[in-house]
Amino acid sequence: MDLPAPELHALLSRVVDTAVARHESLPTARAVPAAFPSRDAVPGVLPDEGVGAEQSLQEVYDEILPFLSNSAGPRFFGLITGGTTPAAMCADFLTTIYDQNTILHSPGDSIAASVEDRAVEMLADLFKLPQDEFTGVLTTGATASNILGLACGRQYAGRVHFGVDVAEDGMEGCGAFEVISNLPHASVVKAMGLVGIGRRRLRSCDLSVDSIETALRSVPPDVAPIVVVSSGEVNTGRLQPSLPEVSALCKKYRAWLHLDGAFGLFARCSPKYDHFTDGVELADSITTDLHKWLNVPYDSAVFFTRHERILRECFTTTAAYLAPPDHAYSTSLAPTHPMNRGIESSRRFRALPVYMTLRAYGRAGYAALVERTCAFAKHVGEWIAAQDELELLYAVDLCIVLFRGKGGRREGAEGNKALVSAINGGGALYVTGTVWDGVPAIRLAVVNYRTTDAEFDTVVKGLKEAALTLA
Ligand SMILES: Cc1ncc(COP(=O)(O)O)c(C=O)c1O
């Protein structure tokens, strides 16, 4: 398996050349390939004798790379998809080369866990979360962070409402748990199933403080409430208003307040948009993705909580061969123990791209990124609102444009599907279909650091041409 240095150098050089060529080509490339083969065409058969690294690399060049999406490019607006900044790209290469396990050994073996600490501190600073109140850990995505949030909420509610330490003793002795929320992301509902709350235990409310209070008041005495707010909502980018009042209500009813800010928390990076997130710092736990608006590679997110003890109760792992679980908590001298704050034991050194991109571009770089992408989304929204063939369904607050086709063969479920296909098939941009308030619709989310005004004409031309094909 090993390779002599010159051969390794040749292979890696080819990869580095590809990195640079791809970086250069992304702004002009199609958003996604015109076609790609089905799963059966991927030659994933285990050979008796391996083909060797060079041949295997050639196969990847021939059979896989041409059919990957250009989701790191500036006109891929599907889901909520960031790219990879040059600093994060370098760091991610190095992460693979050094192959650290971000876990604390006793005795220590690496500075990796300290780098994660620093990365989390810088993120707290970027999001204006008081560093003496919040602690955090990197995760694989907002889904994982939402699982952490609901596990902590369940632990807190178990203690406060039922006097039970759920992490130690299980749910016996507890009543039921209920999540009160307005349009939670699907991953929150998944997390409800995973942590034993139950997917059906969702009590829907609207965004108003009155509605949240009515929901909290109607929870029976033997049921423990957890409130989950979206900042922002995945179809519209809409952010939960009145967070100070929501937080006061949660205190009154002893409900854990979890905030899913998978992308919306980035509004806090810019003085122009941070008013949308007033009161975020009052939440008990907070989710944010980093592979979205921070523009670091997959998979990367962060989870913050102001309740380190609850987090530790949920996630502490003990084994004779590992560093003791109380190792160096909250001292400035030694790193915290990431294994005891999240799901994984062995962990990728995903802190390095986060650390490096924050050091490289700083507060000002991310403020500018948020402002540029939000301005782009607003501009596209205004253009859509002025078209006969398209309809803007929601005023653009942040980075998401929600719209649908109007007239012709563009309306209804089939029309919407056809319009999404026509837009994506054109190659100029990529969008995702959805349903909003019962209406088939299309989302266009702008969080890539390479999306600039230079893309605007190409994007609106792609939208117009697609809409006109369905006259
Ligand atoms: C509000 C919200 N929460 C959670 C998620 C899930 O994020 P991930 O796919 O990183 O797990 C998303 C993804 O778009 C989201 O928008």
Image (spheres, helix red, strand yellow):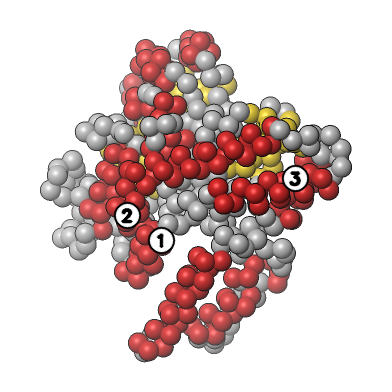
Residue type at tag 2: Ala
Q: Secondary structure at mark 2?
A: helix
Please name the residue that numbered disc 3 is placed on: 464
Amino acid on which disc 1 is placed = Pro
Q: Is residue 286 left or right of residue 318?
A: right
The mark closer to the camera, 3 or 1, is: 3
**In the image, the residue with mark 2 has its CB under 8 Å from the nearest atom of ligand 1:** no
Which mark, residue 86? Answer: 1
Residue 186 in view (yes/no): no
Residue 309, relative to residue 220: is it above or below?
below
Alpha carbon of mark 3 to alpha carbon of mark 1: how far?
Answer: 33 Å
Q: At which x and y percent is residue 82? A: 50, 50
Q: Secondary structure at mark 3?
A: helix
Place of residue 209 in the rendered image (x, y in percent of width and height, measured from the top left): 48, 14
**Is label 2 in contact with label 1 (beta carbons under 8 Å)?**
yes
Q: Decide: marks 3, 1 in contact (CB < 8 A)?
A: no
Residue at the spot 21% in from the left edge and 33% down from the top edge = 132
The mark nearer the N terminus, 3 or 1, is 1
- The foreground one among 306 and 320 is 306
In the rendered image of this protein, does residue 336 appear above or below residue 195? below
Q: Which residue is mark 2?
A: 360
Could you give the CA–CA distance between mark 3 and mark 2, rounded to whole angstroms?
38 Å
Q: CA distance from mark 2 to mark 1?
A: 9 Å
Front position in the image: 457 or 229 = 457
Lateral position of residue 451 relative to residue 385, left or right = left
